[in-house]
Image (cartoon, rainbow, N blue to C red):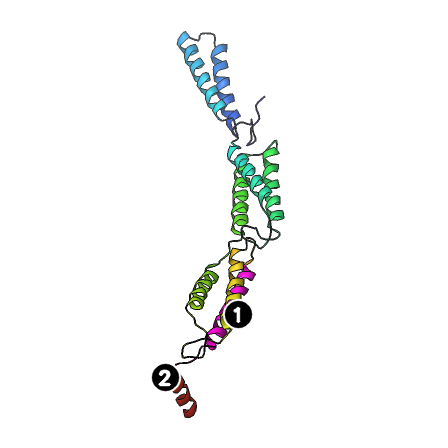
Amino acid sequence: GATEGTAEGNYAVGSKATYKTAIDEAQAILDKTGATQKEIDDALSALNTATDTFKAGKVVLNKTALQDAVTAATSLHAGATEGTAEGNYAVGSKATYKTAIDEAQAILDKTGATQKEIDDALSALNTATDTFKAGKVVLNKTALQDAVTAATSLHAGATEGTAEGNYAVGSKATYKTAIDEAQAILDKADATQKEIDDAVTALNTATATFEAGKVPTTIALMLSRILGFMK
């Protein structure tokens, strides 16, 4: 009842012929009229060894790693949300990932699947999982945080007035509004990278405007006039 092949329950290709030879040799001793007890015992030992070898070649598939990978992937897919906010996954990536999961599941469910098919399915699903994870949105807020920190310090140390080094009257309130708006983006749980980048640009512009309203010192004013005269 043995079948050679690579599917579950099959026996190693070519092993039936080898086993048949061992069986025939044992049968020959049985049929031998003058066989000695030693020949009979040796034949029995040889046939038992051949039987063990034949059985050892029976294909037993290992689907554990693939099953674990499918289970983990299914859980990851179910809990993932597509979008552009922190922790989201690339738009359209869930459908692609689901296809990879379904293909792996099909191999798990395939009656005549070979170990190679199982191993290849595992490799393909692992690659799909890595690709899916790589598409997870990780926002970069460093530049905005640095800009807010610097702006907050500049604002805190600034004095409005008309004296040297003062800032234009009313400019601190305007600047504070820009800082608060940038901070709001930092604190926003579902902020997108575009919102963050736009906030950096807006705050940098507000900082430049605020600094442009600073009353120049006498030296700076004289230098500016000299340079203007030289032009």
Horizontal side, residue 229 vs residue 177: left or right: left
User: What residue does disc 1 label?
Assistant: 174
Q: Report x, y in % for residue 21.
A: 49, 21
Segment colored magenta: 193-217
Q: Amino acid at mark 2?
A: Ile
Residue at the (47%, 12%) spot, across then down: 29
Which element carries disc 2, helix, strand or loop? helix
Q: Nearer the viewer, residue 98 or 176?
A: 176
Across the whole image, how many numbered discs are drawn on residues?
2
* Residue 117 seen from this side: no
Determine if residue 149 is in view: yes
On-image quarter of the N terminus: top right
> For the residue labelled by badge 1, is the local secondary structure a helix, a strand or a loop?
helix
Q: Nearer the viewer, residue 150 or 61?
A: 150
The 10 Å Cα crowd at callout 1, few under 14, some 14 to 19, many 20 or more, is few
* Distance between the alpha carbons at the discs numbered 2 and 1: 28 Å
The residue at which mark 2 appears reads as 219
Q: Amino acid at mark 1?
A: Thr
